[in-house]
Image (spheres, grey):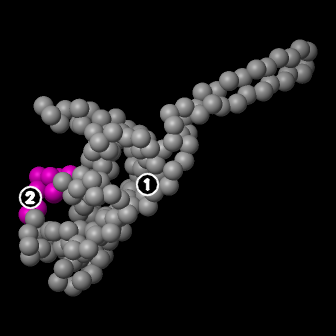
Amino acid sequence: MKFLPILILSIFLASCGATVAVDYDKQVDFSKYNSYNYFPTIDSGLNQLDDGRIMQITDSLLQQRGFVKSETPQFYINFYARESISNSRNTIGIGLGGGGGNVGVGVSGGIPIGGKVINQQFSMDFIDVEKDNLVWQAVADGEMKEKSTPKQKEGYYLSMIQKVLSKYPPKK
C-alpha cells in the first residue's frame, strides 16, 4: 500500500517521460549474465540520497527479473547524470487582437508556469567484470521539477530506470 502513491506518480511521470537510447556490444551473449554489483567507484554527479534511491530501485527491478546482487558479479553497473536547470516549457498564453476590413493586428505572449525544471541526461552502463569491457549502455533524457519532494524524486527515478531496464537485454 505504501508504494501505491509512488506507482501512480511514476505512471504520470512516465507519460511525460524520458526518452532512452541504447548501445551494446553485438558479440556479447547477454543471457550468460545473472549476477551484478555496482562499480566500486561510482561518481554519479548526484547527491548521496539520489544515488541511494537509484541503487534501491535498480536492485528491486533487477531482482524481480532474476538477477542476483553478488560480491563476485558477472557485470558491474555504473551510472551518472548531467543536469541543467531551465524554465518550465509550460506557459499560459495571452493574446490581444483586433482588426477591421482586410487588416488584422494581434499581440500575444506566454507567461511561464510551474517554476524551473532540472533537465537530466542519465546514463547507465553494464561492464563485464571478467573482460573489463563496457557491454551495454543506456542514456535517458528526462526532466523533473527543481523543487521535487523525495517522493517525487523516487517516482521520477523509478520511471526512468524502468524505461532504461526495459531495453535490457537488447533484442537481436
Q: Residue furthest top?
A: 100
| Disc 1 residue type (three-letter) | Gln
Figure quadrant of residue 8 = top left
Figure quadrant of residue 21 = bottom left
As helix, strand or loop, the secondary structure at mark 2 comes to loop
Q: Is residue 26 visible?
A: no
Q: Write the start and end of the magenta stretch as one range.
A: 57-68
Dot 1: few (<14), some (14–19), or many (≥20) neighbours within 10 Å? some
In the rendered image of this protein, does residue 4 appear above or below residue 172?
A: above
- Which residue in the structure is indicated by mark 2? 66
As helix, strand or loop, the secondary structure at mark 1 comes to strand
In the rendered image of this protein, does residue 11 appear above or below residue 83?
A: above
Q: Residue at x 33, y 39 (%)?
A: 149
Label 2 and label 1: CA atoms lie apart by 29 Å
Query: Viewed as shown, does residue 31 lie left or right of 115?
Result: left
Q: Where residue 91 sits: x, y (%)?
A: 58, 32
Residue 120's tag is 1
